[in-house]
Image (cartoon, rainbow, N blue to C red):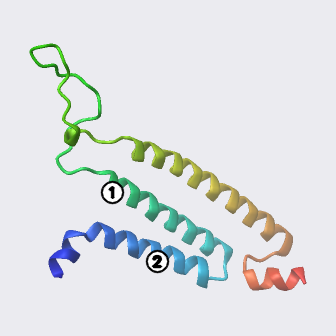
Amino acid sequence: MLEFIIGKYNFWIYIILMMIGFYAMISKNNLIKKIIGMNIFQTAIILFYVSIAYKKGGATLPILTDADAHGEHIITIAQYINPLPHVLMLTAIVVMVATLGVALAIAIMLYRKYHTLEEDEIIKALK
């Protein structure tokens, strides 16, 4: 059991980061703390997907360069690394930064209008 935990330490780190972010989003009343929790949660998910896209022993990108004696390409699928998850996570990083920017801009607007960032006080002011 201990070997399983130590062997998969990166997955445990992602789970801990996700739970920290989720806890911050659910339990905190301050909007900035909720936004930071959301950002931690998103970062953990991106790290998770990049981690599972890694292939042990993968040597190269899927670009055919070698040829055998007949001029045909030698394809060993096990040696190729799939770049698609990494590209998708680059897109997710851009979306994460945009989400963070919009959320902080909305928090600034709420602070200017209600002079607080506490969720309970904003809800009371709305009623």
How packed is label 2: few (under 14 Cα within 10 Å), some, or many (20 or more)? Answer: some
Q: Quadrant of residue 52?
A: bottom left
| Residue placed furthest toward the left | 69
Residue drawn at 54 percent across, 64 percent down: 39
Which element carries disc 1, helix, strand or loop? helix
> Which quarter of the image is occupied by the C terminus?
bottom right
Q: Quadrant of residue 69?
A: top left
On the picture, is 24 further left or further right than 78?
Answer: right
Is 56 above or below relative to 38?
A: above
Q: Disc number at residue 52?
A: 1
On the picture, is 54 further left or further right than 125?
Answer: left
Q: Position of residue 53 (x, y in %)?
A: 33, 51
Which element carries disc 2, helix, strand or loop? helix
> Which quarter of the image is occupied by the N terminus?
bottom left
Residue drawn at 44 percent across, 57 percent down: 46
| Residue placed furthest toward the right | 127
Nearer to the camera, 125 or 46:
46
Q: What's under tag 2, amino acid-wise? A: Met
Is 59 above or below relative to 115?
A: above
Q: Position of residue 42 (x, y in %)?
A: 51, 62
Q: Position of residue 74 (x, y in %)?
A: 17, 26
Nearer to the camera, 109 or 87:
87
Nearer to the camera, 107 or 63:
63
On the picture, is 61 further left or further right than 18?
Answer: left
Q: Are marks 1 and 2 in contact (CB under 8 Å)?
A: no
Residue drawn at 47 percent across, 77 percent down: 20
Residue occupied by mark 2: 19
